[in-house]
Amino acid sequence: MKKNMKSKPAECSDQKRPHRIAFLLLFLLFSFVVICFIASSHVFPLEYRNLVISCANKFNVDPLLVAAVIYVESSYKENSISKAGAMGLMQVMPPTGRETAKKLKIKNYDDKNLLVPEINTRIGTAYLSRLINKYDGNTNKALAAYNAGTSNIERWIDKNGNLSLKKVDFKETKSYIRKTKFFHKLLKLTTFVTGEYKEKQTEK
């Protein structure tokens, strides 16, 4: 009798173990979703979403990629001006801004317009779209060109025609590509987990 009585607590413990594991897994999943959502809210702030999605749809670019570019370029600082002279949310260089504004037929354009979020995002997204099309949808090439200019791309391409990060000899550009792709994947993961942005991405 004593042996049987001693075995009962162990049996109860074994029965509770699957429930504890299931609870722990649910807790970890919930924590993961919350962390992804909080992180993505910094990478793609609510106040810029309509603007980014509108421009991205207009120029047929993934809005989550545009959001990632803005975050890496300026962390959404509208008045940001780099040492090289790149301006605004998407850190557009003035010559690129003037050239793109001309193609978009933006009237009375001035370099200072690059500090206006609506104009900067429109020009930056149009330029990014042009690079993506130029390189047949290759995101690595487009991001490298956006950061370092198109003149450097050819020497970074491997024998298969792909841009090799090993060949990129600009530390800033290599880091830029990795960071942008990381935050792009984070936003895509959040979209998959929460379902957020799905309807907005298909809006025209």
Image: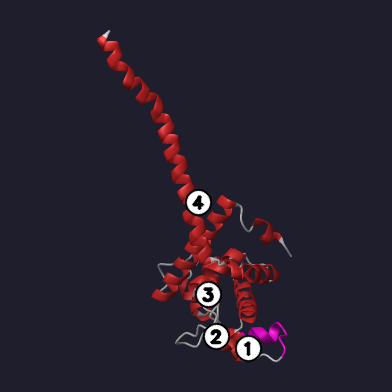
CB contact under 8 Å: marks 3 and 2: no
Q: Nearer the viewer, residue 150 or 174?
A: 174
CB contact under 8 Å: marks 4 and 1: no
Q: Is residue 188 left or right of residue 155?
A: right
Neighbours of disc 4 within 10 Å: few (<14), some (14-19), many (20+): some
Q: Secondary structure at mark 4?
A: helix
The tag earlier along the polypeptide, 4 or 3, is 4
Q: Where does residue 56 sit, x and y in percent of width and height?
A: 65, 69
The tag earlier along the polypeptide, 3 or 2, is 3
Q: Mark 2 highlights which residue? A: 93
Q: Nearer the viewer, residue 51 or 142?
A: 51
Q: Which mark is residue 76?
A: 3
Neighbours of disc 1 within 10 Å: few (<14), some (14-19), many (20+): some
The tag earlier along the polypeptide, 2 or 1, is 2
Q: Where does residue 186 sit, x and y in percent of width and height?
A: 50, 59
Image quarter of the N terminus: top left
Q: Magenta stretch: give its range.
A: 97-107
Q: Which residue corresponds to the image point at 41% horizontal and 35% vertical from the top-left?
A: 21
Neighbours of disc 2 within 10 Å: few (<14), some (14-19), many (20+): some
Q: Where does residue 161 sit, x and y in percent of width and height?
A: 52, 66
Name the chief secondary structure element in magenta.
Answer: helix
In this rendering, the label closer to the viewer, 3 or 2: 3
Q: Nearer the viewer, residue 54 or 6?
A: 6
In this rendering, the label closer to the viewer, 4 or 1: 4
Q: Which residue corresponds to the image point at 61% horizontal and 79% vertical from the top-left?
A: 117
Q: Mark 1 highlights which residue? A: 98
The tag earlier along the polypeptide, 3 or 1, is 3
Q: Mark 4 highlights which residue? A: 33
Q: Secondary structure at mark 3?
A: loop
Neighbours of disc 3 within 10 Å: few (<14), some (14-19), many (20+): many
The alpha-carbon separation of the residues under discs 3 and 1 comes to 22 Å
Inspect this view and state whether residue 57 appears. Answer: yes
